[in-house]
Each structure stands twice: as structure tokens, then as C-alpha cells.
């Protein structure tokens, strides 16, 4: 069985993770530049100063993407490259890089899907309060305007925020990501409300300024659950647990972020849990946040397994020796079945898988090639489950593998490799892995080369 006609096969990346050239052509420091240069914040002190050197090689990157036969490339724009002061002055050299990249993609038949914010806020805005400052919503709208005015003659697919659950949860609550804050719950919720306002104002700006008809989404992540069995009780438990606002790990959920965007209100269980810590907001705020979207982008790598218990959903213990990735994330292929299914049921939008992939243990082998059979098996299993979701009626429009190339994995630096292309960080050489050629063949078949049903994991 192939995927539906028009299904978008893509790959993804993010500006800070691949571009490098952090001091070139007028770009100002981002919060990640400052965080990663602080001792002890990242693996072995790694920074994104050089990364994959993509700023110097847009045509080479476009060749690799087009060589797959991919029809879409999800990329992000670096806010400090476009507006070095955060607002005001537009940096022509920064926008010129994105011109070159987008033109190179289009010339090769690849459609750009542009993410406006993938975590690299200008450091100068952080020192003005960052997301804690309500003005951050208007700052982001101004940045959106600069990008849309320049690129929307060629770009028609947009994402506003990537994973607010992470840049707010890890960046402002746990302190393990930039800007490295450990704020009170009250302050984190205030920053979250401002980020949601920024999303809404950004959507309004795209609708008002885009020069071509545009489709807009967001790219969240959350505490996705899979049922322990396919009994109706376990399925109901998994669905319910997926949309709970948990008391532990409360920043990592779908509904506190997505319900305001797509339903126009905060979830009742979250309001009850957070109580007086909930920021003051108005009906006008909620109208700003609740803008019509065209698709639901979602990043899915794994899920937790739950079952129905006497007092509601409860965790189901995994068997000893279950497979994990180099990130120590569980391999749970049916996350790409239940995730799209549950999210579409709740939010009623077509789904696009905006990230999915594997942190693996890759190196150049003695024959000069990079063999990564684990990644091929991982993607095979997950995509079979995505195909099953589509066969069961879930409207999934596309899939973006993370990532086209190994890159800077945030606090993990260069220790983890997610790419279809191996990156030699010393030289900048790009070496397609076995998985690159496997994915190329898969795209050529529109998914028909997937097995009917893989053997179960064990």
C-alpha cells in the first residue's frame, strides 16, 4: 500500500543546529549562543558556532535534499540573522542567505516549509525580558512581518513556534536549555501565555502580509500515550492521558498549549491544577491566540504506554530490555498511529508529522560508508504505523524525517546523530548514510516499498 497521492515526503532541520556562521554578516548572538558558551551547559562545551556550515553551503544542502526525491524541506529562520536588534533594523545579508536557500530548493523541485521560531531568540531581547515580557508577542509579529514580506512570494507553508513545551519547559523551568532559567511556575505560565500570544499575532501577520495563499500550522510536542492493548478501555485511557495536564512534568503536555490555539480556551484541568499561578488574561487575548490554522504539525519520537486502571489511566511497565535510542528514548512505533489519531480527533485538522527520527551510533566504517541499519528499521516500523493510521481514516498530509543531516543537538552538542547524512564536523564533509538511500527508494515508491507488517519488536 502506498501513501495517498500528494503526500509530502520531506526532511527537516533548524537554523541554529546547522547554519553555523554565528558571527557572520551582521547576525547578533542568540540565547543559544550565550547558553552554549557558558561552561558546563552543553556536552563537552559544544556550541553552534560552526555546526554543519550550512550558511556557506545552501546549494549543497539543496542538492542532498533533492537527491532524495523529497518534495518538502522544513527549515527554520534565525531571528537574530534577520533582525539583529530583535526589532527594527532588517539585516539584508541575513535575508539574502534565505533567498539563496529557498531559490535553490525551488529550482530543484523542493517546497520550503518555513518555521519562524526554532528556539534561537536574539539575546538582546532576552535582556529586555524575553518571553516574560508581554511585548514579546509584538516583537515576534514584527519579525514575522520582515520574513513574510521578503519570502512569501516563494513560501506558502509556515509554522509559527516549534515545541513551546521545550523552549519554555527546559529553557525556563528546568534550566537545561537556553536561556537556562529555573523560574517559578507562575512565571513560566506567564511566559507561556506570551508565547501563545506571539503565535496568534504571527498567524495574523502572515494572513495579512503573505503574497501567495498560505497554509499555517504550529509544531508542538507533548506527553503522547499509547494503549497497552487495543481494548477499548486501554484506548480510552491512552486518549484521556494524552490530553491531561500532569502535575509532574506539567510543562510537557499538549492541551495547555494547543487548546488555546485551536479551541480558544485553556483546559479546565490545567486551570484547576495551576490555580492562582494562571496568568491574568482577557477574552481579547484568547481571540488573538485562537487563530484559524490549516494543519496540525506535530513532532513525534515516542510515547509512554498506559492502561486502564481502577482510578483512571496508569503506566504500563515495559518489558526488561525494551529497545531504546542513543537518547535513551523508547522505540515505540505505534506512537505514529495513536498520535495522529488522537490529535486529529481532538483538534479536527489535517496532520503533518514535522519531526520523527532516531539518535543512533553512527561512524564512517572501514569501507568508507556509514551503515545505519538501526535507523532504517526504526523508520520502517514507525512509517508502517503511520500508514496504518492513514488506512484507518486519519488525514495525514506529510512526513518530515528528522534530520537531513547530523547536527547540533542542543544541550547534547554533537554527541547524538539523527541524520540521513553523516556530518564530518572537522571538515564539513557530508556523507550519505545507508538510510539516505533507503529513504530515497521509499520516496520513489510513495511508501509502497514498506513491508506489509514488520515482525514485532523483542
Image (cartoon, grey):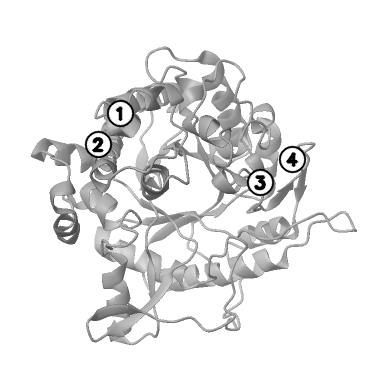
Which quarter of the rendering shows the C terminus?
bottom right
Nearer-N-terminus badge (1/3): 1
Nearer-N-terminus badge (3/2): 2
Q: Are marks 2 and 1 in contact (CB under 8 Å)?
A: yes
**Residue located beneath label 1 in the image:** 136
Q: Position of residue 130 (x, y in %)?
A: 35, 30
**Residue located beneath label 4 in the image:** 425
* Real-space Cα separation, disc 2 to disc 1, in angstroms: 9 Å
Secondary element at tag 3: loop
Secondary element at tag 2: helix
* Real-space Cα separation, disc 2 to disc 4, in angstroms: 38 Å
**Residue located beneath label 2 in the image:** 197
Q: Are marks 3 and 4 in contact (CB under 8 Å)?
A: yes
Question: Residue drawn at (82%, 54%), measured in percent from left and top?
Answer: 364
Crowdedness of circle 3 by 10 Å Cα count: few (<14), some, many (20+)?
Answer: many
Crowdedness of circle 4 by 10 Å Cα count: few (<14), some, many (20+)?
Answer: some
Question: Residue drawn at (64%, 40%), measured in percent from left and top?
Answer: 46
Amino acid at each position: 500500500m502506498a501513501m495517498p497521492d500528494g503526500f509530502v515526503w520531506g526532511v527537516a532541520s533548524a537554523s541554529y543546529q546547522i547554519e553555523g556562521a554565528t558571527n557572520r554578516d551582521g547576525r547578533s548572538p542568540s540565547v543559544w549562543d550565550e547558553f552554549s558558551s557558558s561552561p558546563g551547559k552543553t556536552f563537552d562545551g559544544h556550541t553552534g558556532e560552526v555546526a554543519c556550515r550550512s550558511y556557506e553551503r545552501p546549494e549543497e544542502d539543496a542538492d542532498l535534499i533533492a537527491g532524495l526525491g523529497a518534495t518538502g524541506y522544513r527549515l527554520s529562520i534565525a531571528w537574530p540573522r534577520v533582525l539583529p536588534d530583535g526589532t527594527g533594523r532588517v539585516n539584508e545579508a541575513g535575508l539574502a542567505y534565505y533567498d539563496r536557500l529557498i531559490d535553490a530548493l525551488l529550482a530543484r523541485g523542493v517546497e520550503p516549509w518555513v518555521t519562524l521560531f526554532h528556539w534561537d531568540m536574539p539575546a538582546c531581547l532576552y535582556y529586555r525580558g524575553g518571553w516574560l515580557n508581554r511585548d514579546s508577542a509584538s516583537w515576534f509579529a514584527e519579525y514575522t512581518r520582515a520574513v513574510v514580506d521578503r519570502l512569501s512570494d516563494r513560501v506558502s507553508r509556515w509554522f509559527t513556534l516549534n515545541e513551546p513545551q521545550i523552549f519554555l519547559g527546559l529553557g525556563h523551568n528546568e534550566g537545561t536549555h537556553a536561556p537556562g532559567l529555573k523560574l517559578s511556575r507562575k512565571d513560566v505560565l506567564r511566559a507561556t501565555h506570551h508565547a501563545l500570544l506571539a503565535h496568534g499575532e504571527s498567524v495574523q501577520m502572515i494572513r495579512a502580509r503573505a503574497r501567495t495563499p498560505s497554509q499555517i500550522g504550529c509544531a508542538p510536542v507533548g506527553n503522547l500515550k499509547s494503549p497497552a492493548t487495543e481494548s477499548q478501555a486501554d484506548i480510552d485511557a491512552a486518549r484521556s492521558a494524552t490530553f491531561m495536564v500532569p502535575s509532574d512534568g506539567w510543562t510537557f503536555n499538549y492541551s495547555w498549549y494547543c487548546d488555546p490555539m485551536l479551541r480558544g480556551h485553556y483546559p479546565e484541568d490545567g486551570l484547576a491544577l495551576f490555580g492562582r499561578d494562571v496568568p491574568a488574561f482577557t477574552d481579547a487575548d484568547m481571540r488573538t491566540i485562537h487563530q484559524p490554522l490549516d494543519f496540525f504539525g506535530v513532532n513525534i519520537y515516542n510515547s509512554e504506554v498506559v492502561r486502564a486502571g481502577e482510578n483512571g489511566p496508569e503506566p504500563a511497565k515495559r518489558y526488561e530490555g525494551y529497545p531504546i535510542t542513543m537518547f535513551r528514548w523508547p522505540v515505540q512505533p505505534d506512537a505514529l498511529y495513536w498520535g495522529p489519531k488522537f490529535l486529529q480527533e481532538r483538534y479536527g485538522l489535517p496532520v503533518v508529522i514535522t519531526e520523527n527520527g532516531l539518535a543512533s551510533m553512527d561512524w564512517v566504517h572501514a569501507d568508507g560508508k556509514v551503515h545505519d541499519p538501526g535507523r532504517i528499521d526504526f523508520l520502517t516500523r514507525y512509517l508502517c504505523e503511520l500508514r496504518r493510521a492513514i488506512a484507518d481514516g486519519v488525514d495525514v498530509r506529510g512526513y518530515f524525517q528528522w534530520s537531513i543531516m547530523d547536527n547540533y543537538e542542543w544541550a547534547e552538542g554533537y554527541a547524538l546523530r539523527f541524520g540521513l547524512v553523516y556530518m564530518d564536523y572537522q571538515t564539513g564533509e557530508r556523507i550519505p548514510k545507508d538510510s539516505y538511500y533507503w529513504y530515497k527508494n521509499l520516496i520513489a515508491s510513495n511508501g509502497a516499498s514498506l513491508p506489509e507488517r514488520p515482525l514485532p519488536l523483542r
